[in-house]
Image: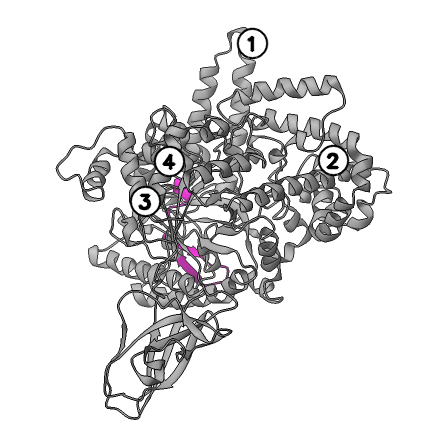
Amino acid sequence: AGSVVLRLANPRVAPHLGLCVLGSDPALGAWDNRRGLVLSDADYPTWAATVQLQNPGEDCLYKYALWDAAAGQALDMEGGENRVIPASGDAAAVRVFNDEDYQQASAWRGAGVALPVFAMRSESGLGVGEFIDLKLLTDWAVLTGLQLVQVLPINDTVATHTWVDSYPYAAISVYALHPQFLHLEGIAQLKSKKDAAELARLKQELNAKDFVDYEPVMAAKWKFLRLLYKQEKKAFLADADYRQFLAEQGPWLVPYAAFSALRDRFGTADFTQWPAGFRTPPDLGALTAETAADYNDFGLFFFLQFHLDKQLREAVAYARTKGVVLKGDLPIGIYRHSVEAWTQPELFHMDQQAGAPPDDFSTTGQNWRFPTYNWPRMAEDGYAWWQQRLSHLGRYFDALRIDHILGFFRIWEMPAHSVEGLLGHFSPALPLHRHEIEQRLGWFDHGRLCAPYIRWHVLEAIFGQQAQSVFEEYLDDAGYGTYRFKAGLGTQRELEAYVAEKLKVKSEELRAGAEPSTFNASLLTELTDYFAWLEKGLYQLVNEVLFVPAATADFYHPRITLNKTWSFRELDGDEARRRLYDDIYVDFFFHRHEEFWRQQGLAKLPAVRYATDLLICGEDLGMVPASVPGVMKQLGILGLNIQRMPATPGLEFSHPNDAPYLSVVTTSSHDMSTLRGWWQENRVATQRYFETLLGHWREVAPFYCEPWVVREIVVQHLHSPAMWAILPLQDYLGMDNHLRRADPAAEQINVPGNPAHFWKYRLHLPLEELVDAVGFNEPLRALVQGSGRG
């Protein structure tokens, strides 16, 4: 009889166990759990075996089970309906069954809470959350039956010493921890009574604020950190634990300390602006040696990271003893002015910028300004940089969220001269050659297709009565009713610099023309708003193209959302010609690259996935290639499901009950409004959601997201078959009128469409109070337990 090949992808098998098949045919043990067909893991996470059935003329029923080699028997046979190998009369045929989804007999499911460390509030904090506050959140998780605490990135982002550093995804080191999370008293008590009194006063003052006032908080942290370093330096340098920490972590710690001290010495993190001898790293060992006269400049940062690491690991150990795990967040990019860019620039494309194409968060795309990765160079040593990074995160976390996991397949890349994201392209990609465009369209004109399409009626539509003044200052007449930008103003970066200088001059003129006592600040605000409006309009003109030139001559990428341009709407010809552009566009963005990007993901992700035993979860929202879910499933990486951002095209809302087991369901992310905030954004959508997802047919949805509505949504997510339901703390608190904020808008953490967003959200009640909220905690625990999670 012909052979049968059975294959199953299952990464969730304990190291001491294997997989086997039990079935009705004698070759599969006739359901005897000691005679199962043992599968090979040679192609892990795929398990496979080949067998010749003894009764091929009959349907063979079978199931997979765990195999305990030591005991010589099968364990925990999968649940659900039996799988079937249909009867076959072909004695020579080889039949292959690529099975999916090990059907857990009793699949474990967990629940967790998401809250950034900086947003935590406790009575012992200094105006911001600190690592020790994780212990309080752990206590609350235990009381409510939750098993996981998820945080945002916790790396050091101090580049400018201003509020801009509040952005947690722009780390100056992928290893170092952020100084804001340090609990000063956890190092030592200040011996100076005067300093101790000042610290107590500042603590009371900063803790009273309803948001993280980043700059005063950091000023206080730095001041008292320096005092503690001076006070404790001798004991610190003699500490055997520090010596071990330095020996183990030195490869990243020494460059970090050097970079941070030089940043402060030269007044900028932009190392290209440092004196010539420091623009590339000198001998860092000699520079930071304890015998050096200026050692204290560097020693402060050794001291800082040693205590941050100690305090975080203490909080992690505490959580683990309570049965709670910590889930971290891995940013997809690195900051342009960072330790890694300084010491390993060959791993990055420093002349490019990473971001995201247009989406629900931003109609012009997102420009994160991070350099993109030089993947071919990283591949030369087996992606060692990524493996070291993941290995280090395992020091603190048991699970990990990979931010924008789509970046391992392709990243949205923009040239250095772009401010917005519309002139970007996916990288790597397969751009179109000019001849291919010409063949498909019947013509190719670089000026018409690739240069900004600027006509007088376009200027009037964008700038109204200011159209003439915009033309005179920024444009030249190119003839035949067309216009082009003046020399030196043709890119968004050039326009950004020009407009900024104009605003500066006009602001100074405004101030100079009035006495301080009579200065009208509202006029300055109007002036600033005007130039912001003008700048946005000028950027729109630059974006008026249909194709973006690739790095290689005569190759082009279709501009994302090109059908929304005047250039597209006013193409010569009829609707049929415009459909030709649509065909190119749809093929390019949704078909052309699928296998290419699948191979890209399979080349990069396994090296990252198997560098650690962390549970890996991928943030796979946005413009997701069709190949991504399959690759993630193959590697055992959990996907993310948010009702408001369904993966299925054309679907307005997804249902948590439809989420696959290898996934995380959540009500909101840090990049969007909370449940209560979203409820008030679109009354029509809210009504549809209320009827179709919550089942309140022909009922009028309440104007506000009342506690009982939030409760229904939370319960719906807890009952999902997904492995994890991890909800923001704000959405849990939405179930209680006394614990939630009055204004739901104040609960949103980030506004992605605003590049100048200040990350300042802070929990409005101390965690100690939340731990004591018995009237809320016990009902929530009942909901979690009732959902079968835990």
Q: Which is nearer the N-term, disc 1 or disc 4?
A: 1
In the rendered image, the residue lying farthest to the left is 698
SS of the residue under disc 4: helix
Residue in the picture at 43% in, 64% down: 597
Q: Which residue is mark 1?
A: 516
Residue 340: percent from left, percent from top:
64, 50
**Residue at the disc numbered 3:** 786
Q: Secondary structure at mark 3?
A: helix
C-alpha distance separating marks 4 and 2: 45 Å
Q: Which residues are magenta?
A: 540-557
Tell me the amino acid under the disc marked 3: Gly
- The numbered mark, 2 or 1, whose residue comes first in the sequence reads 2
Amino acid residing under circle 4: Tyr
What residue is pinned by disc 4?
A: 732
Nearer the observer: mark 2 or 1; the answer is: 2
Q: Secondary structure at mark 2?
A: helix
